[in-house]
Amino acid sequence: MKCPYCAYPESKVVDSRPADEGASIRRRRECLACHKRFTTYETMESLPLMVVKKDGSRQSFDRNKVLGGLIRACEKRPVPYHALEELVGEIEQVLQNQMEREVPSAQIGELVMERLKKLDEVAYVRFASVYRQFKDINTFMHELNKLLEDK
């Protein structure tokens, strides 16, 4: 690590400790030339995820979009906000672990529905009605019947 004071290329680590709830490591370093101390943060590099939409367009994965859809589906439901944040975190982790840099939006939707079904069935049906674009009452009833069969 290059010293910010004298630009000497070598330093020694004096202290290391977790930061940002374990998401990064804070290191106190001392320059081997001028002996001044400075702090660095080490974080894991994450490669950007690209979402391939139905029309073939691509955009970067935005966890806030997923969270927004969940919030709308869970409106006036007894689902705590932290549970929705955890759900989005799980989905993002699954996608990162796949090591695929391009993910179809349909796959994200299925991951959301799979987890939302366990969290709140009414919110699941709400999300599914928008995601699957229910055209009439029959498709809606079909989804409700599947939900009842799973119980």
Image: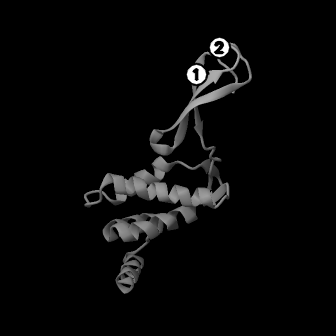
Work out whether mark 1 precedes mark 2 in sequence or the reverse, and give the earlier one: 2
Give how far across and how far down residue 10 sits, in percent: 72, 24
Q: Which residue lies at the image location 50% right of the left edge and 66% below the top edge?
A: 111
Return the residue at label 1. 38
Give how far across and how far down residue 5 sits, in percent: 65, 13
Pointers 1 and 2 in contact (CB under 8 A)? yes
- Is 108 in front, or is 28? 28
Q: Which residue lies at the image location 61% right of the left edge and 48% below the top edge?
A: 59
Q: Could you tell me the amino acid type at mark 2?
A: Tyr
Q: Could you tell me the amino acid type at mark 1?
A: Phe
Give how far across and how far down residue 110 sits, in percent: 51, 68
Q: Is residue 118 left or right of residue 50?
A: left
Residues under labels 1 and 2: Cα distance? 9 Å
- Is 109 in front, or is 139? 109
Where 11 sits versus 68, above or below?
above
- Is 117 in front, or is 83? 83
Return the residue at label 2. 5
Q: Secondary structure at mark 1?
A: strand
Residue closest to the far right: 9
Classify 10 Å Cα crowding around label 2: few (below 14), some (14-19), many (20 and above): few
Say which quarter of the image contains residue 44: top right
Residue closest to the far bottom: 149
- Is 151 in front, or is 142? 151
Res. 135 in view: yes
The scheme the figure's colours follow is one colour
Where 50 sits versus 150, above or below?
above
Classify 10 Å Cα crowding around label 1: few (below 14), some (14-19), many (20 and above): some
